[in-house]
Image (spheres, rainbow, N blue to C red):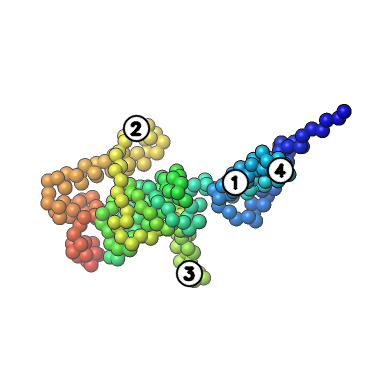
Amino acid sequence: MEINSPQGLFSKRPALRAFVFYSLGIASGVYVKIFPLSAIFIAVILAVTALIFHYKQAVKHATLLLYLSFFVCGVAQYQVATSGFPPTHIKRIADTNSHVTVVGEIVEEPDIRADRTYLVVEVDSLTWCRRKLKSSGKILVKIREQSTIFSFKDRVRFSGNLFSPGGPRNPGGFNFARYLNIKEIFGMMVLSRGEDLFLIDNPYKLRWTCILNVPYEFFVNRLVAPLRRILLDGYVKYLPKDQAALLAGFVLGERRNIPDDVARLFRDTGT
């Protein structure tokens, strides 16, 4: 008596079929534009659904869903491989135009103007779609008022709508997005007030081994920045608040806490 082998989820050369669907997904990645994390999420849903159908003896449906999950994984693989950015890089998150909470470090001196302030923040983590993710990349934060409460190397946390910089509004006009991309800035966020950003303690940890790898970063982050902080703390400790802020501005270029009327005089005279 001949016994038929069971036709299950892993029968009939499943590895070969999975490879074919995965390869088709990679080939289709040229035409399918989808955020890699979203594709991975869809693939997981398909795989879980396939497993449910498998246990309910719906073999054909389970097999189809499982192979579709491999196809979607192939699409995600293509998007990751061709963009040059990891799935959680800030550029990928910015392309979704989503509300996020960002934690990062101010890596340039704040650009303080009469009616707005610009901060360049190196992101190290964010909360997106209720998930906390490790991230990387720089974003430009625009505050719609003059704010002097932030400085170079401050760690900050803030929330808002993260979006990708737009291109030129007119043909042949200034391409702001390209300008930011050259500076490796791939996202933007606009906040109403400086109080929308919260300062986070950033203790300095001396790591002598990093001088062998990135001497400039070691010099700035581990020597100059701590010395700068010591001087600022000394001014605040031994001088009145306004005098300490003014001296810090002259000696160290520290513009936060300078009285508004004094800052306006400097700005009006081009100093």
Q: Amino acid at mark 2?
A: Trp
Q: Crowding near pointer 4: few (<14 within 10 Å), some, many (20+)?
A: some
Q: Nearer the viewer, mark 1 or mark 2?
A: 1
x, y percent for residue 180: 44, 57
Element marked by disc 2: helix
Q: Picture quarter containing residue 5? A: top right
The reply to whether callout 1 and callout 4 are in contact (CB within 8 Å) is no
Q: Label 3 sits on what residue type? A: Arg
Could you tell me how far apart the alpha carbons at marks 1 and 4 are, in whole angstroms? 17 Å
Of the 4 image quadrants, the one containing the C terminus is: bottom left
Point out which mark residue 169 bears.
3
Kindly identify the amino acid type of the residue bearing the numbered disc 1.
Ile
Identify the residue position indicated by label 2 in the image.
208
Residue corresponding to mark 1: 45
Kindly tell me whether residue 258 is visible in this rendering. Answer: yes
Which mark sits nearer the N-terminus, 4 or 2?
A: 4
- Can you identify the residue that label 4 sits on? 58
User: What residue do we see at 45% from left, 49% from top?
Assistant: 130
Identity of the residue drawn at 49% across and 71% down:
170
* Element under disc 3: loop
